[in-house]
């Protein structure tokens, strides 16, 4: 069967595990990003991790990528938390400046390398078919850490997202909580570098959560659904890109294919959500007519 | 009233954001089971005083004591009710989930809500007249109903002091009645209530005491004594209009 057959190849099996785990992780974290309206902050993080990736690679080769990304991710998570606490600065402008500056630093550094174009492409868009077992282990560790963090802090995170003033009044340390969420997003970006690159990961964070949100109003449904959509898109995207290149001789970049599959799934979810809301409305109308009678 | 324990003490207190003083020289005492209305024009510092009572804005001179403690240390027993229209109506939470947030402090981070927690949530919703709406999404309720849900969240926290920021703004008559009833029953159980409002009639109805504010304090004491035309004119500047000698309307809030 076409959905399973490609994964007899060991490199395809590794790519599958990486993308499915990553899709599920990003989908989960993405729900919080969506609720807190942090899409732009997250996008900034994806770009600022890039110079870390380059520096890590320059210093220690492929093995240094993860640690470089991790260092850059944590540093920018702290910077972003401080920046977004002070509401007086025009936050958008400051974020845009940070994003482009650090991105440019990354490009300048990588352009001094001999394999410039090939390295740049790999860092920006990922190369999931060359994922190693060590990198799979890194992704697994990041997943466990982030999911555990979110599970433990789910109540304060929810309260802070819904009602920041109420959270403060209830004694929640909002600044610290914001830092934790930014670090969680940074960790997802770090984990995603190899598979989809630093640029495309934002889609992995936002799209599954947005798709799940349009299908349900209940968090208890939205979170697992986003997780599922992310994982399914990883799988399907990989199958599509494999089939296209093996079956039809069309080479499709797997990371980008995953993103396009995600967007297609979002389109379907949005349409289904539209129908659901229409149906819900007419149900409510019938109910109110019945009650009136 | 004097045999009741004081729950809020303002002693020549000044409150400031950084170097900018917002409220100066506040004096007054509120006891168990009493409600005080904070009345003053927009920008008078009513919300700032509420934040100071939560320990979120510093007292720079004088002293504020909440339940015998500095404000930041009293939060456990204080519940805050924000204005409902400051919250995102698209947020995917149910009415029940919002009220359960009032129990978070008792539940902690990991434990599942117990039967007792659920009973408190159901009881709080009952007290604001929304028992039938528990499973509905918060954003599908009317503005007044959302305000009642937020009050239910505060009730579920079992506070000894309740702080409400403009709870009657844009609220329909049914919800206003339900809010007043619920506040009255909390008072009867011994909780103190601090409520900021523009509505003088509500201050008369619901509150024993009034604090007139506009950067400074223009009066603090029993409602009937403080809500006089002279004092209101002083508080609101030229925007208070006298009707038939004993009634006052405020022309600009």
Image: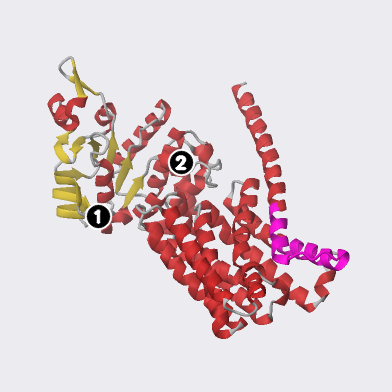
Which mark, by number, is residue B125? 2
Above or below residue A136? Residue B72 is above
Q: Main secondary structure of the magenta part?
A: helix
Above or below residue B169? Residue A210 is below
Residue extent of the magenta highlight:
A234-263
Q: Is residue A174 left or right of residue A202?
A: left
Q: Earlier in the sequence, mark 1 or mark 2?
A: 1
Residue A274: x %, y % from top left: 67, 40
Residue sitting nearer the eye, A283 or A246: A246
Residue at 36 percent across and 53 percent down: it is A87
Distance Cα–Cα, label 1 vs label 2: 28 Å
Residue B132: x %, y % from top left: 53, 37
Q: What's the chain of the residue with tag 1?
A: B
For the question of whether residue A143 can be seen, the reply is yes
Query: Which picture quadrant has residue B249?
Result: top left
Q: Which residue is mark 1?
A: B71
Query: Where the N terminus of chain B falls, by quadrant?
Result: top left
Above or below residue B223? Residue A132 is below
Which mark, by number, is residue A102? none
Disc 1 secondary structure class? helix
Residue sitting nearer the eye, B205 or A243: A243
């Amino acid at each position: 069967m076409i959905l399973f057959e490609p994964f007899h190849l060991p490199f395809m099996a590794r790519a599958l595990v990486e993308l499915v785990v990553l899709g599920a992780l990003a989908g989960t974290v993405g729900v919080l990003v969506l609720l807190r309206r942090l899409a732009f902050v997250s996008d900034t993080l994806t770009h600022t991790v890039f110079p870390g990736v380059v520096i890590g690679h320059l210093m220690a080769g492929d093995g240094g990528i993860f640690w470089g990304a991790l260092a850059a991710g944590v540093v920018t998570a702290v910077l972003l938390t401080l920046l977004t606490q002070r509401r007086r600065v025009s936050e958008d402008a400051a974020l845009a400046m940070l994003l482009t500056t650090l991105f440019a630093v990354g490009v300048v550094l990588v352009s001094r390398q001999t394999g410039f174009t090939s390295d740049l492409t790999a860092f920006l868009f990922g190369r999931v078919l060359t994922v190693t077992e060590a990198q799979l282990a890194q992704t697994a560790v990041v997943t466990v850490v982030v999911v555990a963090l979110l599970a433990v802090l789910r109540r304060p995170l929810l309260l802070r997202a819904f009602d920041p003033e109420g959270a403060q009044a209830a004694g929640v340390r909002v600044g610290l909580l914001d830092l934790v969420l930014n670090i969680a997003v940074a960790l997802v970006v770090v984990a995603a570098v190899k598979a989809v690159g630093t640029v495309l990961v934002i889609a992995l964070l936002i799209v599954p959560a947005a798709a799940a949100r349009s299908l349900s109003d209940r968090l208890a449904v939205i979170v697992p659904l986003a997780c599922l959509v992310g994982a399914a898109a990883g799988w399907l995207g990989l199958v599509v890109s494999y089939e296209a290149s093996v079956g039809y001789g069309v080479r499709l970049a797997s990371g980008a294919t995953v993103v396009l599959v995600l967007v297609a799934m979002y389109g379907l979810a949005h349409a289904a959500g539209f129908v659901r809301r229409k149906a819900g409305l007419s149900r409510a109308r019938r109910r109110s007519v019945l009650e009136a009678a | 009233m004097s045999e009741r324990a004081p729950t809020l003490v303002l002693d020549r207190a000044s409150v400031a954001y950084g170097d900018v003083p917002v409220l100066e020289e506040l004096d007054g005492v509120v006891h168990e089971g009493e409600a005080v209305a904070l009345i003053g024009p927009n920008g008078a510092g009513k919300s700032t005083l509420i934040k100071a009572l939560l320990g979120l804005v510093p007292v720079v001179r004088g002293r504020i004591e909440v339940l015998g403690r500095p404000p930041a240390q009293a939060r456990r027993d204080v519940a805050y009710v924000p204005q409902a229209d400051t919250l995102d109506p698209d947020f995917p939470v149910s009415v029940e989930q919002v009220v359960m947030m009032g129990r978070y402090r008792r539940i902690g981070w990991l434990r599942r809500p117990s039967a007792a927690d659920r009973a408190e949530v159901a009881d709080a919703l009952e007290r604001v007249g929304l028992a039938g709406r528990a499973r509905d999404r918060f954003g599908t309720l009317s503005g007044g109903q959302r305000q009642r849900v937020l009050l239910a969240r505060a009730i579920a926290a079992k506070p000894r002091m309740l702080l409400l920021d403009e709870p009657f703004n844009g609220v329909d008559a049914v919800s206003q009645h339900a809010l007043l009833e619920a506040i009255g029953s909390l008072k009867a159980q011994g909780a103190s209530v601090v409520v900021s409002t523009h509505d003088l009639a509500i201050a008369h109805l619901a509150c024993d005491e009034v604090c007139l504010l506009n950067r400074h304090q223009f009066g603090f004491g029993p409602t009937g004594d403080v809500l006089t035309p002279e004092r209101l004119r002083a508080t609101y500047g030229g925007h208070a209009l006298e009707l038939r000698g004993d009634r006052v309307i405020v022309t600009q809030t």
